[in-house]
Structure formats: C-alpha cells, structure tokens
Image (tube, rainbow, N blue to C red):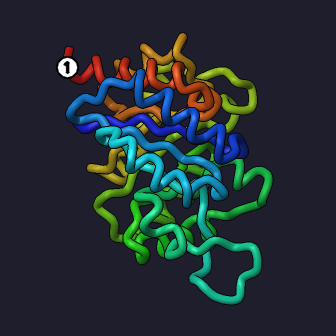
Amino acid sequence: MKKYVIGNWKSNKNKKDAQAWFSEFATLYTPVAGLEVIVAPSFICLCSLSEYVQALEIENLSLAAQDVSPFPKGSYTGAVAADMVKGMVDYVIIGHSERRRYFRETSQDTANKMAETVDAGLKPIVCIDQPYAMSQLTALHDIDCDEMILAYGPVEGMIARIPEQPKRVAEATQFISQVHPRRPVVYGGSLMVENADEYIALPELAGLFVGQASLDAASFATLCNKVGTSLTA
C-alpha cells in the first residue's frame, strides 16, 4: 500500500518562514519509495513556494492548497478558484472540520469544492469526521476521481487535543473503506512524534494527516521518516 504523510500548516508561516522550513526539511527527510509527502502552506505562500520547492528537488513531495472556492473563476470577491492554484499544487484539502466549525460549511459545499477541484485536474484530500461521516461520504458518490484521499479526523479529538484510540481509528477506517473502497484513508487528530507509532502500525491506514506537528520541520521530518521506515521494515 502506498503511504502518505500530509502536513497542514493552517494559518501559520509567512514566505520567509516557509522557505526556511523547506530548506531544513530537505536536509532531514529521507525519501522512500512508496511514500508521498504532501504539505499545505497558506495561500499567500503558494506561488513562491511552488518554485522554491521545485528547485530543492525533494523526492516524492507535493504541495496542497488548504481550501478552494466552491465556485469557478469569476465575480466572487475574495474567493480562490481551484483553477487558479493549478500548476502550483497537486492536491487540495476539502471539508476540514475547522471549515465546518468556524465557517459553517456543509456537505454540499464539500461536494461543490470537490467538483471544482477535480475539474481543475487536481487531487482532493477530503476530510471525514464524526458525526457527519455518512453525509460527507454520500456527497462524494457523484464525484469521479481515482486519486482521492480520505482523511479521517474525529472533531472531539482535535478539540480536546487527544488522539482517538487506535482501535476506534481502525474501526472508523474500515467503515469508510466499506462505503468508498479502494480509497486510501489517512488519520489526523492531535498526532505528534511521541504518539504516532501505534497509528503508523495500523494496516487499515494509508498514512497520517497532521497539523501542529507539521509546523516544525524537524518533527515533521521525523514523522515522515518513521512512516518511511515502516515501509522498508
């Protein structure tokens, strides 16, 4: 199984900080066949970082946008259409629980963003949480994309900053895989270097989706290297 480690910087880092992060990460990360690393900086960094990261030539590393508009290009003030980030990123994070919680986004918003992302030729990372899992998964049925990644993250765990028990993560992953078979499922929710090993070892999971742990280049490189080691063990 191909593995993924996805880092979501959320609302952090300016251009200078972002470039310094990638320079440090490049010296610490050991690429492994079968492992793809995906990093989602803020929108303001994407243009410069896409060129900067390309020059670093870090193997099997891709950039992602943290969100896109549910609308195409046009008269939508303040919105960033999926087509506008094409060429800068390969992936787009869609439906994160923070978008639902703070911006009142719905499953229909997720489906619309999915459609825009796929139409732009980008790969969606679709976030699935409880208690909305079924409605979120149902909204994906009409989207045809073989390269979709599903990211499971229970809202309660992220709010309490306590990861869900590995057994429950495995059960949730199995449920998601029954609804959408053959889609890789990654887990995110208060994961750090210190508590990631049990989740890396779960055969149901295709990788990790981390927020806070991705802000420090050394910590994130350690996580990536742990997952890489699991592939070669």
The answer to whether residue 94 is left or right of residue 229 is right
Q: Quadrant of residue 184?
A: top left
Q: Nearer the viewer, residue 3 or 182?
A: 3
The answer to whether residue 159 is left or right of residue 172 is right
On the image, the x and y values in percent for residue 93 come to 53, 54
Q: Compared with residue 216, is residue 45 higher up or lower down, i.e. above or below? A: below
Q: Residue sitting at 67 percent across and 44 percent down?
A: 10
- Location of the N terminus by quadrant is top left
Does any portion of residue 77 appear in the rendered image?
yes
Q: Nearer the viewer, residue 80 or 151?
A: 80
On the image, the x and y values in percent for residue 18 come to 60, 41
Q: Which residue is mark 1?
A: 232
Furthest residue in direction top, as rendered: 194
On the image, the x and y values in percent for residue 140 come to 45, 64
Q: Secondary structure at mark 1?
A: helix
Furthest residue in direction right, as rendered: 102
- Location of the C terminus by quadrant is top left
Q: Residue sitting at 63 percent across and 71 percent down?
A: 80
